[in-house]
Amino acid sequence: MDFRKISNVTVECVIFSLENAELKILLSQRELQINTSGNTKLNDWIVTGDFIYKTETLQQAASRILKYNIEYNQVHQEQFDTFGDPNRIWKEKDIVWLKKLDAGTRLVSVGYISLLAADMFKNKKSSSQWFSIKELPELGFDHTEILKSAHEYLQKKILMEPLIFELLPNKFTLNELQIAFEAILDIQLDNRNFRKKVLRKKYIVLLDEKRTGFSKKPANLYIFSKDIYNKIVEKNQLFIF
Amino acid sequence: MDFRKISNVTVECVIFSLENAELKILLSQRELQINTSGNTKLNDWIVTGDFIYKTETLQQAASRILKYNIEYNQVHQEQFDTFGDPNRIWKEKDIVWLKKLDAGTRLVSVGYISLLAADMFKNKKSSSQWFSIKELPELGFDHTEILKSAHEYLQKKILMEPLIFELLPNKFTLNELQIAFEAILDIQLDNRNFRKKVLRKKYIVLLDEKRTGFSKKPANLYIFSKDIYNKIVEKNQLFIF
């Protein structure tokens, strides 16, 4: 593997997870103190990313970046958009930062979303931190826009494909599923209607098992069946829209 | 506008249209004769693309590439994938070609699909030609894979979003709609079932107008109503999948 970096192409991983009924994003701290030229000081947050290596694919870069930050059992990554606006980078602190990295400001960034199932991972780096999508800090570069675009992509995608199950534990309660939809879409759902709709879906399968928590009555557990889902899609192929 | 090109980033436009019940793709001829070093001769086809300019967005590059080839009234372009495998370019003729262009072989290519509505465009360049997706010539670079990926993206997308109407004239017959689905998905549809399914869709609106062709009986004309579609999507938001 040739570890030299391509200085104008990065992969940016928008890493999502669900925790306590909130959609969360893992961000990396960016810190830089320049003493010689006076007061330029950098201490903010960025989407987790890196330049690509000469001899790796984009997908390999996305996977490397994730592995560097997280220890996980279950993950789904997919490309969602590529950013190439020539005016993406114009703030002085971003220019200073890139100069330090020996990179120019005409960067093309390939965006990936990573979906981490709740309770299936551990942070590896102390300079990374989870933030609620509703309480984001100031971000470097155009990462606020990249993040917004990733969130919109996720919102759209979970209505059309069973992507939401990537964010849930393998066995989940209907309440957890509802909370996941509500957190990602930022809406309130009517409980009874939601359950009625969900129970009509043959690919959401009731298990002979319950989750018991203290102070709550035991809740039914379900799994998502990829097999059943694929059969239904095949049969109804035309006009899902 | 700074017209200098970025030598390792291209935009590739997979340009689709429908003609005579076939899904077609516009390809560009690649021709190169090197006399000094003997017999290296290049004469094949590639997806229409170019390096991006220093001062344009990816979308602007995609639009420029299309405009250079086609005169059109109605077009839909969207990014579908970005290709960055380090082993994309290995054939000798591709390396020769890139050398001539002063570019290296570690290229990142952003793929766009362009959907041209039937009868709404005119070719501008004689070195471009339409090919049926079923009868493709030998393609340079990894463009056979790029094209395959674009086709699969389109097949998946037309089942989930009303993208197919971008390839049809504004007013269309049900027969034309069926042929479009069949051409893109490469399947045969049962005529009666198809019509029944379509007529249930409120966003496919019957016009008080018929198309008359000689030797056929006049056929009802329809339009796709974006307004009605958007209202239905809003109402049924959850679980389209």
Image (cartoon, coloured by chain):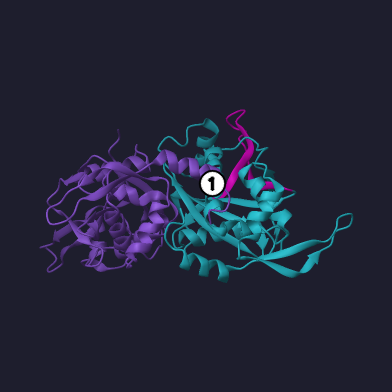
Chain colours: A purple, B cyan
- Which quarter of the rendered picture does the N terminus of chain A lie within? top left
Report which quarter residue A73 is drawn in.
Answer: top left
In the rendered structure, the answer to whether residue A95 lies left or right of residue B142 reads left
Question: Disc 1 marks which amino acid?
Answer: Ala
Where residue A69 sits: x, y (%)?
20, 46
The residue that appears at 40% across and 49% down in the rendered structure is A162
Task: Work out whether residue B225 or residue B5 is closer to the camera in this orientation and state it.
Answer: B225
B214 above or below B98?
Answer: below
Where residue A123 sits: x, y (%)?
16, 47
Can the viewer see residue A188 in this picture?
yes
The residues colored magenta run: B21-49
Can the viewer see residue B179 in this picture?
no
Pointer 1 local density, CA inside 10 Å: few below 14, some 14–19, many at least 20: many
Task: Work out whether residue B53 or residue A43 is closer to the camera in this orientation and state it.
Answer: A43
Magenta region includes residue A50: no
In the rendered structure, the answer to whether residue B40 lies left or right of residue B207 reads left
Where residue A85 sits: x, y (%)?
41, 62
B107 above or below B210?
Answer: above
The residue that appears at 57% across and 69% down in the rendered structure is B228
The residue that appears at 63% across and 46% down in the rendered structure is B184
The residue that appears at 27% across and 38% down in the rendered structure is A3
Identify the residue under disc 1. B150
